Image (cartoon, rainbow, N blue to C red):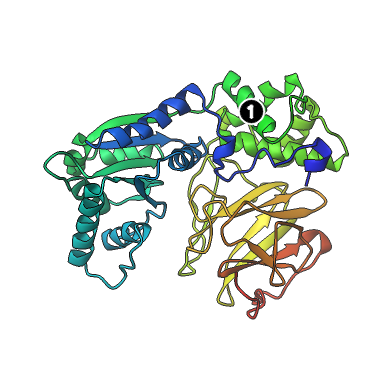
């Protein structure tokens, strides 16, 4: 998209949690140290909280990447599950196929495996992201798992990561026994102004800037005012600015470029934001519902330049208007459009909309995005394009062309899934 224009080898502001781009602020370093402490101390939980987009998942991925071979990990990211589904998820991570087991069998299998691995000299870690979605019943199951022990120590180390409401849930009276087992709690704040500047320069350096000035010095205070130092918002704004400058055949971002992009995105200053609307599409094909998030996205107040219809099994399940800005599509609630499906990655793809075009880009997803059965990295969307994401299809409609499909139309039922 703009790599050649800015002489970069990688996209510096991807939303996917790439450990190579991790910037360790003082707070991030401390949170990472707390995670690492679980390897040496098996007596209790470590809880890491932070607002949406603050870098929790990138920290987790970095922590996991650096573990030694003698550490066996179960990583659970889908947390809107029953207690049985949770136990199945953990066993799947450990290499089992537990879907026909009853609860007693699940617990016995898990207990035997943990003790066996411990006796073989291996350390076992359970990492749960988006833990604020866990029910009290599932949290009680986790407490019971933490009680599996030998005569010397606990067998399973546990890290819970989630949004701030996780702390409220853990402090509920009915979870007092669980709360007593929490050894360390840490809240990950947004970056300070100085840290945000260092964060941007760090990501550019990793991407190959070699010290070249890509953002002028007067850009950073504006970026901070409108992002509040939240890494995901910083990535969104900086990436959009690079796209805009590359379209104008320029290789340096100036303050005026930032303000122009902010105008297109229709962002207000971070301190004044009250949230946004996020769309949810379940694997059972329920309709979209509203929830709250950190990032302002294009909505009814912005002029619609295009729209997408979301379908599964040949039936339209949701619709979203596209205004100037960026729409992130993925499996978790942190996205602008959430598709709850095991075929969809945490942050699967993005659609960047300008006054003149819309571009869809894969965000290093596991299963990719497909156009006419061909996997694509990014694609300039044309009216009528059908993009396949797992078992869902996205029909792109360019409102600028005046195209209107019949009310009962939907993406081609015969279009192959990824």
Number of numbered markers: 1
User: Which one is nearer the viewer's eye here, 197 or 67?
Assistant: 67
Viewed as shown, does residue 344 lie left or right of 171?
Answer: right
Please give the name of the residue rendered at 14% of the width and 39% of the height, measured from the top-left corner: 152
Q: Is residue 309 above or below residue 213?
A: below
> What residue sits right under mark 1 in the picture?
202
Quadrant in the picture for the C terminus: bottom right
Task: Tell me where residue 232 sits by quadrant.
Answer: top right
In front here: 9 or 45?
9
* Position in image of residue 56 (x %, y %): 46, 38
Closer to the camera in the image, 321 or 8 = 8
Find residue 68 and report its horizontal and vertical position in percent. Answer: 40, 41
In this rendering, position of residue 112 left or right of residue 308: left
Q: Is residue 401 above or below residue 413?
A: above
Residue sitting farthest toward the bottom: 414
Q: Quadrant of residue 391?
A: bottom right
Left or right, residue 197 beside residue 79: right
Q: With respect to residue 358, does 101 lie above or below?
A: below
Secondary structure of residue under mark 1: helix
Residue that appears at 25% across and 49% down: 120
Answer yes or no: is residue 334 visible: yes
| Farthest front residue in view | 120
Q: x%, y% of residue 214?
A: 77, 28
- What residue is at 86 percent from the left and 35 percent from the top? 250
Q: Position of residue 410 (x, y in %)?
A: 65, 74
């Amino acid at each position: 998209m703009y790599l050649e224009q800015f002489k970069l080898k990688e996209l510096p502001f991807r939303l996917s949690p790439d450990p190579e781009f991790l910037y360790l602020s003082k707070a991030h370093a401390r949170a990472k140290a707390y995670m690492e402490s679980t390897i040496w101390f098996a007596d209790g939980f470590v809880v890491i909280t932070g607002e949406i987009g603050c870098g929790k998942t990138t920290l987790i991925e970095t922590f996991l990447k650096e573990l030694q071979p003698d550490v066996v990990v179960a990583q659970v990211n889908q947390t809107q599950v029953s207690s049985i589904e949770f136990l199945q998820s953990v066993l799947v991570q450990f290499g089992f196929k537990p879907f026909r087991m009853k609860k007693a069998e699940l617990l016995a299998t898990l207990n035997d495996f943990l003790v066996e691995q411990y006796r073989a000299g291996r350390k076992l870690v359970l990492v749960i992201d988006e833990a604020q979605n866990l029910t009290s019943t599932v949290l009680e199951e986790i407490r019971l798992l933490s009680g599996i022990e030998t005569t010397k120590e606990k067998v399973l180390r546990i890290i819970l990561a989630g949004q701030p409401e996780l702390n409220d849930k853990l402090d509920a009276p009915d979870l007092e026994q669980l709360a007593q087992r929490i050894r360390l709690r840490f809240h990950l704040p947004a970056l300070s102004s100085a840290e945000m500047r260092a964060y941007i320069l760090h990501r550019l350096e990793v991407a190959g800037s070699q010290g070249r000035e890509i953002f002028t010095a007067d850009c950073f205070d504006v970026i901070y005012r409108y992002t509040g130092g939240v890494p995901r918002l910083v990535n969104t704004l900086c990436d959009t600015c690079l796209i805009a400058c590359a379209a104008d055949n320029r290789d340096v971002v100036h303050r005026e470029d930032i303000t122009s992009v902010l105008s297109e995105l229709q962002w207000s200053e971070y301190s004044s934001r009250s949230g946004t609307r996020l769309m949810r599409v379940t694997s059972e094909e329920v309709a979209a519902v509203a929830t709250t998030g950190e990032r302002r996205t294009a909505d009814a107040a912005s002029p619609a330049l295009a729209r997408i219809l979301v379908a599964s099994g040949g039936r339209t399940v949701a619709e979203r208007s596209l205004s100037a800005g960026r729409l992130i599509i993925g499996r978790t609630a942190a996205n602008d459009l959430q598709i709850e499906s095991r075929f969809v990655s945490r942050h699967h793809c993005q659609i960047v909309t300008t006054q003149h075009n819309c571009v869809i880009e894969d965000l290093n997803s596991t299963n990719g995005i497909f156009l006419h059965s061909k996997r694509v990295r990014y694609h300039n969307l044309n009216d009528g394009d059908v993009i396949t994401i797992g078992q869902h299809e996205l029909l792109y409609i360019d409102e600028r062309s005046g195209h209107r499909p019949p009310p009962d139309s939907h993406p081609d039922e015969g279009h192959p899934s990824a």
